[in-house]
Each structure stands twice: as structure tokens, then as C-alpha cells.
Amino acid sequence: LFPDSYKSVQAWHVVHSRAGSIALARARRDLHAAIAGLLPSGTFEVCARAKSRISVFDKVVLRGKAVKDMLAARVVVDSEEDCWAVRALVAGLWREDLARFKDYITAPKPNGYQSLHVTVRLPCGRP
């Protein structure tokens, strides 16, 4: 449907995902090591991802939004207390964008979903 737009997104994605994947791997490693100093082994999981080409296309071309989450990490912990502790740890590692902070623990979604969404800027400058 949008071959020119897709080609543009594809070229943009190649450039940003290469540089981003290096930064993301480093951030994931640093985050895992920091959490390992805070929580017992087996009580947390750290996952990371770069936004896929099709997700970028959907967000930019089809929905007309900016990509602010090209890179993402997810930390799964056992308790609310651990969640807040990890959030404090993340704030010590990287600079937070407080305008994009979402607290779904204090105000859970109607389906019971609880989490904290924190946007940070990595040392390489990537959000």
C-alpha cells in the first residue's frame, strides 16, 4: 500500500537499529548487573528489544506518531516493592524523562495490569 514510505522506514530502521542494538546490549548488561546486586538471583528477569521495522512503519506511517521507544528493556520482578527498588536503581543509572513516566501500580489498569513505565536516556543519547 505504501511502498515508498516503507522503503524510507526500512532505511531509517537499518541505521537506527544497528547503533541502537549495541547501546541496548550494553544497557541490558549494565541493568542486569545492577539488579543482581540488589535482588536475589531468580527473582527478576531482564529482557530487551529494538522496535521492529513493521512496528516503526505502523507507528509513523499509519498512526502518524513519532517513535520514542525504538529501544526498550523490560524488568519483571516478584513484588511491588522490588519494582519500586528497580525504578530507583534505573534512575541512578540513567537520566529519566519524567514527563513520560507512567505508574500503573498506584493506578492499575481496569484489567488489573500493574507496572511502571520509565523512559530514560542512555549515555549514547538514545531514549
Image (cartoon, rainbow, N blue to C red):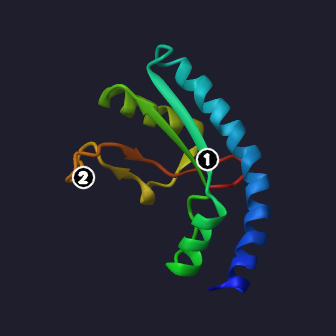
Q: Quadrant of residue 4?
A: bottom right
Distance between the alpha carbons at the discs numbered 1 and 2: 24 Å
Q: Give the left or right position of residue 112, taking residue 18 as reference.
A: left
Q: Mark 1: few, some, or many residues within 10 Å (few <14, many ≥20)?
A: some
Indicate whether 2 appears above or below 107. Answer: below
* Mark identifier at residue 86: none
Indicate whether 111 appears above or below 15. Answer: above
Q: Residue at x 58, y 25 (%)?
A: 34
Q: Residue at x 61, y 47 (%)?
A: 49
Residue 86 vs residue 57, the one in the foreground: 57
Q: Position of residue 104 (x, y in %)?
A: 30, 48
Total numbered labels placed on residues in the image: 2
Q: Residue at x 44, y 37 (%)?
A: 87
Q: Amino acid at mark 2?
A: Lys
Which residue was labeled with disc 1?
A: 49
Q: Residue furthest top?
A: 40
Indicate the quadrant containing the C terminus: top left, top right, bottom left or bottom right: bottom right
Q: Amino acid at mark 1?
A: Arg
Q: Give the left or right position of residue 67, taking residue 87 as reference.
A: right
Q: Position of residue 6 (x, y in %)?
A: 69, 77
